[in-house]
Image (cartoon, rainbow, N blue to C red):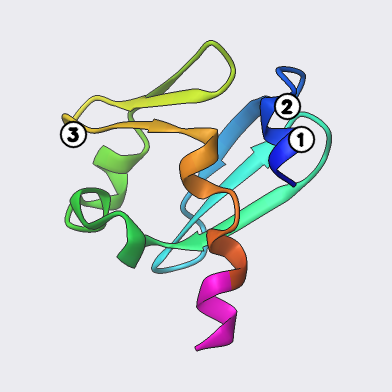
């Protein structure tokens, strides 16, 4: 998977917070990454409406209007499997 992360053709289409306690990233190639918000405590403490205020920069970077953190696609890759193991 590491080689695919270096492939700049992977890009984020949109984010959703439809599943309680989770962030979902829809990639332009059709994949869906669902990760628990516990891995992103600064986002978890925001109300859902404030989480929805984000901007996708360069197809792989996410900036949230109400958070000082900057997230990259790589921050989410692999985490979707970690939470299912527990």
**Residue on which disc 2 sits:** 10
Looking at the rendered image, the disc whose residue lies closer to the viewer, 2 or 3, is: 2
The image position of residue 52, as x and y in percent, is 37, 37
Residue at 30% from the left image edge and 50% from the top image edge: 48
Q: Is residue 68 above or below residue 47?
A: above
Going from N to C along the chain, the mark reached first, 1 or 3, is: 1
**Residue on which disc 3 sits:** 67
Q: Secondary structure at mark 2?
A: loop
Going from N to C along the chain, the mark reached first, 2 or 1, is: 1
Q: Residues within 10 Å of mark 2 (few under 14, many from 20)?
A: some
Is residue 77 toward the left or the right of residue 4 in the image?
left
Looking at the rendered image, the disc whose residue lies closer to the viewer, 1 or 3, is: 1
Q: Is residue 85 magenta?
A: yes
Residue at 46% from the left image edge and 53% from the top image edge: 17
Q: Is residue 53 above or below residue 33?
A: above
Q: Residues within 10 Å of mark 1 (few under 14, many from 20)?
A: few
Q: Which residues are magenta?
A: 82-86
Residue at 55% from the left image edge and 23% from the top image edge: 60
Q: Is residue 8 magenta?
A: no
Residue at 53% from the left image edge and 61% from the top image edge: 79
Secondary structure mostly seen in magenta is: helix
Viewer-side residue, 83 vs 12: 83
Q: CA distance from mark 2 to mark 1?
A: 8 Å
Q: Do callouts 2 and 1 mark residues in contact (Cβ within 8 Å)? A: yes
Which quadrant of the figure has residue 41? Answer: bottom left
Is residue 4 toward the left or the right of residue 5 in the image?
right
The image position of residue 86, as x and y in percent, is 49, 89
Q: Is residue 48 above or below residue 56?
A: below
The circle on residue 36 is none
Is residue 58 toward the left or the right of residue 51 in the image?
right
The image position of residue 3, as x and y in percent, is 75, 35
The circle on residue 4 is 1
């Amino acid at each position: 998977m590491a080689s695919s992360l270096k492939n700049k053709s992977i890009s984020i289409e949109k984010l959703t917070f439809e599943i309680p306690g989770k962030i979902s990233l829809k990639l332009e190639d059709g994949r869906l990454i669902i990760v628990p918000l516990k891995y992103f405590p600064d986002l978890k403490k925001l109300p859902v409406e404030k989480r929805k205020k984000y901007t996708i920069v360069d197809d792989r970077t996410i900036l949230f209007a109400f958070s000082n953190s900057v997230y990259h696609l790589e921050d989410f890759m692999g985490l979707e499997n970690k939470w299912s193991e527990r």
